[in-house]
Amino acid sequence: MNIELRRIGELRPYSHNARVHSRKQIRQIANSIERFGFCNPALIDDEGQIIAGHGRVEAAKLLQIEKIPMVRLSHLSPDEKRVYPFADNPLAEKRITAQRQAKEVYRSRATASRKNKGRKNQAG
């Protein structure tokens, strides 16, 4: 694995980014970079598209860092590029799982509500 320094301006955000960071989260990442250095490189494809590390890139912009460490993931297929951010970011997967669970609860309540209305109509 080769780590290369790239200018932030050369990078493009990934359209399927798994996570949107709040300003507070970006500030927290920036604080970590200030304290410990840039210990976790961003992951990019051959076209300079960010696959993982959007928050780190935004934090580096906030800190006015011009170049950051990158690892190029040339071996990933387009499908793997879409899936990898979820593997890299377990919080995103937990959020999506929670969203799915909420949808299931909503569906089951809606189904139960329809069944109860049907019973009331039959009884009345």
Image: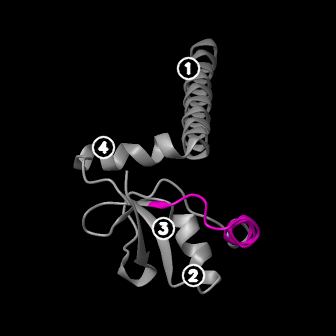
Q: Residue at x 61, y 66 (%)?
A: 38
Looking at the image, which residue is at 37% across and 43% down?
83
Residue indicated by mark 3: 69
Q: Earlier in the sequence, mark 1 or mark 2?
A: 2
Amino acid type at image mark 2: Lys
Residue 2 sits above or below residue 105 on the image: below
Task: Name the residue that disc number 2 marks.
Answer: 61
Could you say which disc has been placed on residue 5 in the image? none
How far separated are the C-alphas under marks 4 and 1?
A: 46 Å
**Residue 81: image location, x then y, percent:** 32, 50
Range drawn in magenta: 26-42
- Foreground of the two, 117 or 52: 52
Going from N to C along the chain, the mark reached first, 3 or 4, is 3
- Residue 46, by quadrant, is bottom left
Which amino acid, by three-letter code, is at mark 1?
Gly
Q: Nearer the viewer, residue 121 or 58?
A: 58
> Which residue is located at x 41 percent, y 84 percent?
9
**Amino acid residing under circle 4:** Glu
Residue 19 among those drawn in magenta = no
Numbered circle sitting on residue 118: 1
